[in-house]
Image (cartoon, rainbow, N blue to C red):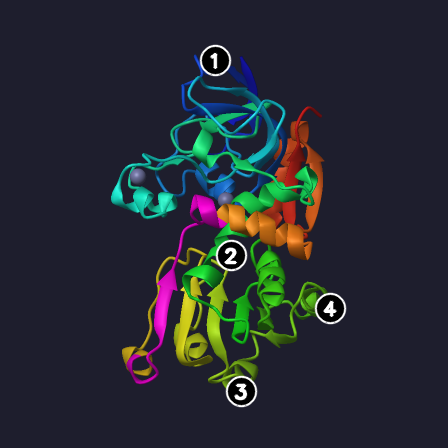
Amino acid sequence: MIHAYAASAPEADFEPFEYDPGELAADHVEVEVEFCGVCHSDLSMKKNDWGISQYPFVGGHEVAGRVAAVGDRVRGLEVGQRVGVGWTSGSCLRCDQCLSGYQNRCPDAEGTIVGRHGGFADRVRAQAAWCLPIPEGVSSVDCGPLFCGGLTVFNPLVENDIAPTARVAVVGIGGLGHMALQFANAWGCEVTAFSTSPEKEDEARQLGAHHFLNSRDEQALKSAAGSYDMVLVTVNASLDWDAYINTLRPGGTLHLVGAAEKIEATVFPLIAGQKSISASPTGAIVRAKEMLEFCARHDIKPLTEQYPMSQINEAMARLESGEARYRVVLKAGE
Ligand SMILES: [Zn+2]
Ligand SMILES: [Zn+2]
């Protein structure tokens, strides 16, 4: 039996819950959860914001743990080895997306907390290909949030061919943005933090921002016209999109990883400056491996607040408050 925490309805608290996962599939791995990050998507799924949740709902898709058992056909992973599991826990591995290295875009990809039970538990299962070995130099305590949030903000640097000479702005200094600042700085970029909270300036600079812009200040936004090769939006709020597009250099990209409901923008500045609007979901398997190596090399880690997993409801409330600095992590077995 797997011992988990489940919510029985959108508004219900998480409570202890046991389930029998059945026989371990030949290409799957059972992971003993050591730490599991709490991501905003866990909250959205618990509340069924996207209409795809099933109850009892067991969230948790930022798992850092150890291989507890491997299926018969699994090669290259050993019991006891440290691994992580993120948003995706399986894909078909034979469609065009999978074969071209974009397993995260597989139409049949399985979400770790979608229609199955996730990592708010003592154990969780995933397809072996999606169990990512954690390199030495990356601690398990810190790395859970890398597997969803970290990958989500690392991926746009690669997908948009961001050069080390580029200027990058990160909109929103929270769970995602505070990791994005670290990545963009280590990438070599000139980094600007956009935040509505001026009190975050010192910390944003410590995390790698060279500049800080109070995004409530319309004049400051205006004076940043033509400044950035990529503006990475990590918030899910509706913004004055034209004002942000105006801060792009010609050829620049407004890249969205926060799910605002809608985007409305004037087309002409996009054409005139050959600017684009793009978006991306987490990242491919190889991208996750590159990200982990990059984190080890540059000592990048999320800032976390730790809770015992038994205090999952307090941890969720903390996440929902928006006050966490910056990522909430649960320690299993406590
Ligand atoms: Zn997530
Ligand atoms: Zn596929």
CA–CA distance in space, label 2 to label 1: 35 Å
In the foreground, 5 or 35? 35
Q: In x, y percent, where is residue 333?
A: 68, 24
CA–CA distance in space, label 4 to label 1: 48 Å
Q: In x, y percent, where is residue 209?
A: 65, 70
The three-letter code of the residue at mark 2 reads Val
CA–CA distance in space, label 3 to label 1: 58 Å
Determine the secondary structure under disc 3: helix
| Picture residue at 43% right of the left edge, 66% below the top | 161
Question: What residue is pinned by disc 1?
Answer: 20
Question: What residue is pinned by disc 2?
Answer: 153
The three-letter code of the residue at mark 4 reads Asp
Q: In x, y percent, where is residue 226?
A: 46, 84
Question: What residue is pinned by disc 4?
Answer: 202
Residues shaded magenta: 271-287
Looking at the image, is 297 positioned above or below residue 74? below
Answer with left or right where residue 101 lies relative to residue 188.
left
Answer with left or right where residue 23 lies relative to residue 186.
left
The three-letter code of the residue at mark 3 reads Ser
Determine the secondary structure under disc 2: helix
Quick one: label 2 or label 4, which is nearer the N terminus?
A: 2
| Picture residue at 44% right of the left edge, 49% below the top | 283
Q: In x, y percent, where is residue 108?
A: 30, 36
In the foreground, 199 or 88? 88
Residue 14 in the magenta stretch? The answer is: no
Circles 2 and 4 in contact, beta carbons < 8 Å:
no
